[in-house]
Image (cartoon, grey):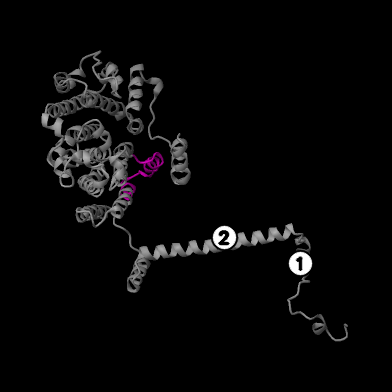
Amino acid sequence: MKTSDVLYLLAHPNQLRAIIQWKVWHSPLHERNIENESITLRRCFEFLDLTSRSFSAVIQELCPELCISVALFYLILRGLDTIEDDMTIPLEIKEPLLRSFDQVLEKEGWTFEGCGPKEKDRQLLVEFSAVIKEFALLSESHRVIIKDITKKMGNGMADYANNAEHNVNGVNTVADYDLYCHYVAGLVGDGLTRLFVDTGKANPALLERPHLINSMGLFLQKTNIIRDYREDLDDKRRFWPKEIWTKHIERFEELPLPENEEAALNCISEMCLNSLQHVDECLFYLAGIKDQSVFNFTAIPQVMAIATLALVFRNRDVFHKNVKIPKGEACELMIEVGNLRSTCGIFRKYMKIIRKKSTPKDPNYLNISVTLGKIEQFIETIFPTPVEHRAVAERAQMRATGEMPEQAAAARKEMMFLIGAIVATLSVISGIMIFVAWLMGARFDIAFQELRKGNFRSPGYNPVASAPHGEL
């Protein structure tokens, strides 16, 4: 761990506590039985750890009916995505491979060594035969679902790879942006939901609401696209829709320039606004999950996304480096997610951060406020906020005096801090005075003895005047 990370955790003890709690005390709902796993299956889970440690952790805690199927589903789509992302693969090889990748799953022993040496997930494709071998052992219903999604996603990726305009200028319209995110993320949610319903872990009604499923994927993908601006720009890729960024800047590469800072921040705001429009449907989807391990699996990425969105909102660092939420904060989120109520609470917390960072100077300020209000209203319909009579009376009194609850709370906090500071200061001064007196020879032991005997008198005490007659 870096020194900067250690200093950060020392300054944020709650996050340090969350890391320790997660590492030491966290007890998974379900655990893999590694001793009963084949060598190839263990290798698949090793690839899962290498490709995404965050997803790997929640996948491996899924119920036994889903754990292996979801792990292999993830690796298959990761292999497909690796081919699509690798700009060193010629289009004449890439396009047919993407369109036929679902057929590859039936070819025993198939591997691919055509990725560039710098491609981070290259080894997964080099040893892809292990994934194919374990895929053949899944139930027929799960194989059909995974193959169907792989085929749809592969064809969608091939369409974009073969689109010269997309390769040169990136995504043009918001509609194109939504379609791209649907192919690379929305389809994943479709496949996962079908797996959940097939095993009885989710309400079948979710399959009748594809817009909810799609929003789950789009919210995650769009948040990642905002965060990855710098990385994608360095790789000569553009996923921010031209329809949005041209409102604020002439050239996409000019967003990081200091003279364009205000326009760039307004551009991030509009991108975040576009992502926030999926939040209420994501929460609606989560209400249809029946199993706790599946709820954790689906909810944790969503709370990570809203935390990331709050971090990147009007954050100039996005244009210069890859911005991520701290590991301690991620552990806090994983611990806090337990049910829909707590998940809604997490969303509320980060929406407050977004609202606080929003500024009237932003042309999308009103739209952002309306969107956040819509989400708040949706949460309120599910979990109404309890109102105590005393709280109502206090609020009415505060309004009558012109002082709002937030101001009153801040004032009380400031007063308690002031009182604490005064007590601490007096204690320190008294301690110093007593210590100095002791150094100069003061006999506190004698003073205490006299005090117990009651021999100390007030400064104006006169022994003669106070003595009874006849005792002198």
Res 129 → quadrant:
top left
Name the residue that disc number 2 marks: 424
Res 133 → quadrant:
top left
Residue 278 at x, y percent in the picture: 21, 45
* Image disc number at residue 452: 1
| 434 over 401 or under it: above or below | above
| 363 over 120 or under it: above or below | below
Magenta part, dominant SS: helix
Residue drawn at x 30%, y 26% is 68
Residue 35 at x, y percent in the picture: 41, 20
Residue 88 at x, y percent in the picture: 22, 21
Callout 1: SS = helix
Segment colored magenta: 324-345
| Residue nearest the observer in this picture, 32 or 467 | 467
* Image disc number at residue 405: none
| Residue nearest the observer in this picture, 2 or 142 | 2
Q: Quadrant of the N terminus?
A: top left
Residue drawn at x 30%, y 27% is 71
Q: Is residue 126 magenta?
A: no
| Residue nearest the observer in this picture, 256 or 123 | 256
Which circle, 2 or 1, is nearer the viewer? Answer: 2
Amino acid residing under circle 2: Ala
Residue drawn at x 35%, y 67% is 389
Q: Is residue 330 left or right of residue 283?
A: right
Amino acid residing under circle 1: Arg
Q: Is residue 466 left or right of residue 245?
A: right
Residue drawn at x 27%, y 28% is 74
